Amino acid sequence: MVKTALEEFAFLIPILPALAFVITFFFGKKMPAGGAIFPILAIAGSFVISFMITLRMLGNPEEVISQSHSWFAVLNFGVLIDPLAAVMLSMVSFVSLLIHIYAVSYMSHDPGKPRYFAETALFTAAMLSLVLSDNILQFFVSWELVGLCSYLLIGFWFEKPSAAAAAKKAFLTTRVGDVMFLTGIIILTSDLLKLAGGFQDGTYLLRFDEIFSYIPQLSALQANIFGFEISHLTIITLLFFGGAIGKSGQFPLHVWLPDAMEGPTTVSALIHAATMVTAGVYLVARTFPMFIAAPDSLMVVAYLGGFTALFAGTMGIVMNDLKRVLAYSTISQLGYMMLGLGLGSVIGLEAVGVSIFHLINHAFFKALLFLCAGSVIHAVGTQDMRELGGVGKVMPITAVTMTIAALSLAGFGIPGTLIGTSGFFSKDPIIEAAYIFGEHSNNWIPYLFSIAAAFLTSAYIFRLIFMTFTGKPRSNYHGHESPAIMTVPLAILALFALVFGGLTRTGFMAFLEETFTNSFVNLNIGNLAGIGRNELIGTTGNEPLLILWLPLIVALAGLAIAFLIYYLRVVKLGPLASMKNPIYRLLYKRYYQHEIYTEFLSLGIVYGVIAFLTQVIDVIIDSIVEAFGIITVGVSEELRKVQTGVVQNYATAVIAGVGLLIILVKLIMEVI
Amino acid sequence: MESLTMGNLMFLAPEIAVVSTGLIILLIGVFMSPRTKNVLGYLATLGVLTALVLTVESFGTNAALFSGTISIDALSQFFKLVFLAVALIVSLAAIKYNENSDHTEEFYTLVLFATFGMMVVASANDLILLFCAFELASLATYALAGFEKQNARSLEGAMKYFIIGSVSAALMLFGISFVYGATGTTSIPAIAANPAILTGNPIGLVAIVLLIAGFGFKMALVPFHMWAPDTYQGSPSVVSALLAAGSKKMGFVAAFRVFILALAALQPDWQLAFTVLAVVTMTFGNVVAVSQTSVKRMLAYSSLAQAGYIAMAFVVMTPMALTGSIFYTLAHAFMKAGAFIAAAAVVWMVSSGKTDRLDIPDHLDNFKGLGKRMPFAALSMTIFVFALAGIPPTAGFMAKFVLFSSTIQAGMTWLAVIAILNSALSLFYYARLVKYMYFLPPEGQKIRMPFPYAAALLFAVAGVLAMGLWPEPFLQWAMEAAKVLV
Amino acid sequence: MIPLVFYLGLSALLFSIGIYGVMTHKNGIRMIMCIELMLNSANLNLVAFSSYTGTLNGQVFAIFSIALAAAEAAVGFAIFMAIYRMHDKINLDELKILRW
Amino acid sequence: MLPVASLLILVPLIFAAVTFLTKTKGQAAGLGFTGSLATLGLAIYAYLNFESSTAAMQFFESMTWIPSLGVNYSVGIDGISMPLILLNAIVIPLLILYSWKEDRESPNRFYGLILTMEAAVIGVFVALDFVVFYIFWELTLIPLFFMVNIWGGEKRAHASYKFFIYTHVASLIMLLGIFGLFYASWQQTGIPTFGIRELIAQFQFFESGLLKDAIFLSIIFGFLAKLPTFPFHSWLPDAYTEAPTAGSVLFILLKIGGYGLFRISLPMLPNTGNPELMIMMLGMLGSFSILYGALVALRQKDLKRMIAYSSLSHMGYVILGAAGLVTLSVSGAMFQQFSHGLIMSILFMSAGAIQTSTGTRIINDLGGLAKKMPKLTVVMMVGFMASLGLPGLTGFIAEFLVLAFSYARLPGFVLIALLVIVITAAYHLWAMQRAMFGVYNEKLGDIRDINSMQVFSMAAIALLVLYFGLNPSPVLNMMISNSEAIVSLAAALGV
Amino acid sequence: MQTNRLLPFLVSLLFVAVVVIGAFGTSWNTVSELPGNPADQSNIEGIGMLIFTQYAAPFEVLSVVLLASLIGAIYMAKGEGNK
């Protein structure tokens, strides 16, 4: 009986925060703390439901919750809670709950509190709805709504021009990805209709089970693009991945994420570290059966993920802004997750487990990093690391929790044992999988990407730790430790960042691997991989010892370098970190992305050339229309002069008219 | 040779009513003082109204009188309805125009005699009668056009009207003489029965074009239209209404009778001639109207354009087209007469005030803010110009609807396209007039509309809307009339 | 017997002379004279046809048309008198306030 | 059962006539509001008694009018017209509320014209006879012409002329097509009729493919110019921009072009000489309009002009969906009409509110208005988001249906339209950022937020946008029934 | 009007040419013999008969024409002092 009861509450998971949004939005002003209590209670409710469902499902992963209702036409909305969704729901509601609590204090001085809490509540609702959607359209709808909330929250301090600009940039850049995603959905819809031979009564066209059941047929459809025969499934999955690129800040659509740090730090923690940006990873995981059945798609995912992990790391290492370092770190870690998923072409369903495991752990330690950074910014009033230093003395709790988070991020742990941070248990399997991939296909590029990125990760995060918390203050700030309402969430998160990975390691992956074999869908991943011409091989853990230890070694190397340069200051950075150094300039200018994307592509090509030319065409079309009027008036002005006013001329006209008309008619009659 | 009985005379009751009213007015007017002469206007209105009722009642009768020189049929009765409707509007409006004038009786007698002439033309079944009646309508209106003897414009308009009218009369007579020479008769049915020489010889074309010139003068077809803008502009507005709405239709009915009934054998020739004239006329009228600043002159050019549309019937020559064309004449009578009366109201307003442009009393500038100064005049003028532009639900729309659609039916899409584009072009200047009336600030006081103008406008508006909203009876009559021609 | 076309030619010539006069003379009186010439050339036509077709209609028509021409001339002269009163001359080409 | 279809025309018309005669502003606005409420009541009555699941004509009335031409006064409501009638009936009372507190000269004319417009537009929607249809079609021109000319902006005269004459020409060309249809049918059946359904049914029996194409093209030209679509849109930016706010909203509610497309052109399309070509043409016009409108909007400096071009871009979806010729794409196109009416009303009301308080519409002269006008900002944000196709609001439903289901037939054009989504987002967000966010431009002085009436009316529309975005079925279902009828007709002919 | 006589001349020439060509090019249907000596055979009687029988209607109309032109001419020609 408990089971049925729980199922019936499932729909409340997104509804509760949504209601909180409405209440806080309209009545928040009249309430203490901007009505924060409603979102907190609602999200707590969501968390409880999610967590209970997850717990129950751990025992019986085949029995998933699936409810569908007709929305419009052949489309539906519904709830699907399978292992994948369950862990995501729990994580999202949990992190969101902690951050909301933290924000009560963090935002306490801001007059826009009601708006803030309303928008974050809406965000949570949308994110939860995204996670538990049972069809691709609801997924997309929620996907867009979280994007909207991201836009609104980045631009929360809209009076700051930079915030308004960053919000716009975030929305537009992710919109590029969204359009690809939408295109994928549209092609998918069109293909499904074709394959199903029209609308079938009783089936919901875009529900995941329906989609998955057509994977072989979709794969068989071929399109000819520039002479290449490409499977429709590949096109669709790549377009989906395009959406994921935008949302999860993968190269080349990662540019918005660092700018998004213009929003309040809590927003960065919630949206741009823990939850929304992982939606892209979640999308790929959710549609993993399609990806694995599509030739070449996972390869693209792996390459782009790996490259992003490295690429973002290089920029993270030169940033001076506390939050920007974290932002690049997020991009880099999301790259890891993508890489993990991409390696599914070799390790199969395990990739989902590895990647989502990293996603969850990342949520904890990255949220923690941001909240710690927020704590520092809240106390000190600046986020430029060059002006910080020695904060550890003033804010010990923050310093400790942040160091824990950093260790987790860098992936410290002892291979072969159960000792290690959360990040260690989820990042290392990815790197190991990359090794297996390399071994299997003699393609070492993903592995090289991942190992290099691991080094950079360690380097930039300890650079941050040392620059911020050690040494002497480099500017005149007055800091103080944050109040308990802020430090308690920090501590909770620190706990999770430290031990969650170690505790759940074995069960977690096994649990997630049940995602595609249950009462909702029952897929044979091996067969699907065959369709995608992917050969699956064994699991991780049997690599040479060096390979197991290598990630730790490079992480230590990174730590050591950071320690030498930023703590002991044995190396003078002056000439190296100057704009005269082309490599530094390239990194500091972030590979000239602003110049290429904003100034050249957007303003130059689209706005300056294409839109300008269209406007010229518009003027021409308009002039043609106007010309009719002008010509008519001109002709009229001339023609009226025929009427000279002299009666003799009138008579002439009459007589000439008679004569000419006779001749004219005669001539025409002759011709005809 | 049948004898003239009272029964036969009853067929002519409308004509008799009109002409005798004219004579009575002339007679008693002599003995009245200028102040009491207003009564004459009402008397004339009453006479015209009586004739109108008699005409409507006589619908459906057919008769041939006076040795077959007069034919009473649906066509004649329909056109009499047109002329009498115009005469009614003009008589009503002229009550105000002739207020305190010493020459009321002359005015009304001439109006009524002109109307009588037009009515006879509508019935004429013999070229001699047709020519005489045509001249009657012309002669009476020459004097009317110059009725404001102290007004240089009025006189100039009358003079031009007279010169071109006389030349055209001569041309017509010349043309008739050839027709007579070729057939040996002046009776329309007899001509139709004996077209051999005309069809086989060049003189047929010459005669046709001469006749077209003669009728085209009244119809105001380019290039026989030259007098029209000047005269319409210069004449008193009520007279312009009579000319544009009434006497123009006389040209059409004469042309219907002479070309379609008498010279049917020469259809290819006159069809071609009318094709050229119709297209040139509607285009010229619309284009030149665009740049006019005098409202009456603009209406004159618009009247040219409308003549071009009506003349399309001679080109298309299907029963539907003739129906449309005949329907159009009635619609145009209401619209154009109404529009000129509205202009007359403005001219009156201008001359009774001091703030406006007096040199050209019907200048567009004087229409500024008319919506505030004389709301009813502005509203009815708006209805008239929108009707002229063919915007539903007005008579103009229905008329164009039937006429243009018949062009499509006959497969002359090109002609329909020209006509439609012209119609769209016309909106340009009509809309400008509306703009002046409603969108520009008034430059004078609000003025109470005199009753006669209001009554005349009301009648015209009623006609325009009735024909737009309930065209069925009018269409039936027009169809009957068209049947006479086919 | 004089062929009919001679009459027709003559009347056409007369008509053209009238036309030419109307087109070139400025004086109103002369113009009316020219118009009369045109009307009369048409009458000549009518009478000639009447004789050559052996019907009398044409001559009746001619009589009517003469009467009409007289009436027309009367109205015309009256209009010119009014014009003369106003402008002290009847040069019709100078009356062109109404144009364009 | 009330004769709802006729009453829907008559009630606003009568109220309009009475409103014209009122003397004071209070009377005029009150009477106008009452009239529009009465119409709304009728529309709701019709909706409640409406059977959504059938494509059949309901509330049908017919009377002979001009028997000699086969003209009947016949009216009726079906799933194509019902949503549009509702749209007008809902928005116009709110529009009157919106402009309640504005001071303007001759309020009696203002409110009278709004009601006249309502009557004329509803007249087009219910007409089942081409003559009735055309009469109301043309009648819609006049109130707008007056509206723009009396209360419009600086270049109002030019704009109103252009709009009036341009669309009149298009209507006349459409009229030619109607004539062709009428006579060709008359010739075949021997019975003259102007009945829309009868003539469309007869259309397939015409022998000459050329004739069919000519008729089809000339009729659809009238609709396309009214919608409008690239390249027949020149009248739109000027007219929309120069019109007063109420006029712009009335322009938006003027959904007769798209309505004609569904009512008349689509059922005819499969029977034309070369349906594939026609579909390609429509698809091309649709996607080009989407692209073109968005690109030009991107470069506009004037807020209202930008919205006007965005409207052009959005109407492209209507054509694209219609060309898709699949049940759901056609329904999507119909839904786009409905949704566009609501969304653009908000946008034009917002632009109008900004102009009234700041005195300018130039986006770069604004800035930071969100601080001074928070209420407006919220509603405007909903409008902008809906306009750029954010899910959860009506715009998305329509765009998704159109794009997803037109793809099968017109993949290339759908891809073009998809690309534009980013540009659409770009100009909306740019305008939002420049006008509403950032530092407040102190040159604008002290400005006021929108008044409570305006908040109410705009928020009501915004809520509708949200409601129908979350639950489109109430209107979408009736559209689907009718689209099915249209598409099955096409499918039967193998198109 | 010395300046502008060429055009009128050409126009009249055109007119006369057209009419003359038309008239000369036509085979008129004429009686073979003209009715004798007009002095002997008066047609006054015939004309009179026609006017009062067949053409009574034009005759009546003509009377109105004369009256109308009388009124018109008198009205126009009368010089009322108030110039």
Image (cartoon, coloured by chain):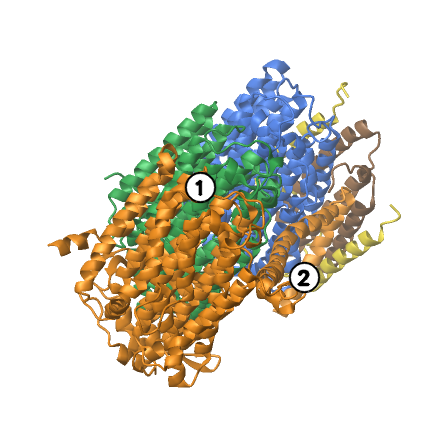
Chain E: colour as depicted: yellow
Check disc 2 and give the amino acid type.
Answer: Leu
Q: Which mark is residue D378?
A: 1
Question: Relative to residue C45, is residue D244 drawn left or right?
Answer: left
**Amino acid found under the numbered disc labelled 1:** Val
User: Residue A17: horizontal and vertical position, in percent?
Assistant: 31, 47
Q: Residues within 10 Å of mark 1 (few under 14, many from 20)?
A: some
Residue at 68 percent of width and 31 percent of height: B143
**Is D95 placed above or below A316 here?**
above
Give the image location of residue A517, x and y in percent. 22, 71
Quick one: B139 or A288, which is closer to the camera? A288
- Give me the chain that's blue: B
Report whether residue B456 is seen: yes
**Colour in which chain A is shown?**
orange
Q: In the picture, residue A547 is in which quadrant? A: bottom left
Evaluate if marks 1 and 2 touch, with contact meaning CB atoms under 8 Å apart: no
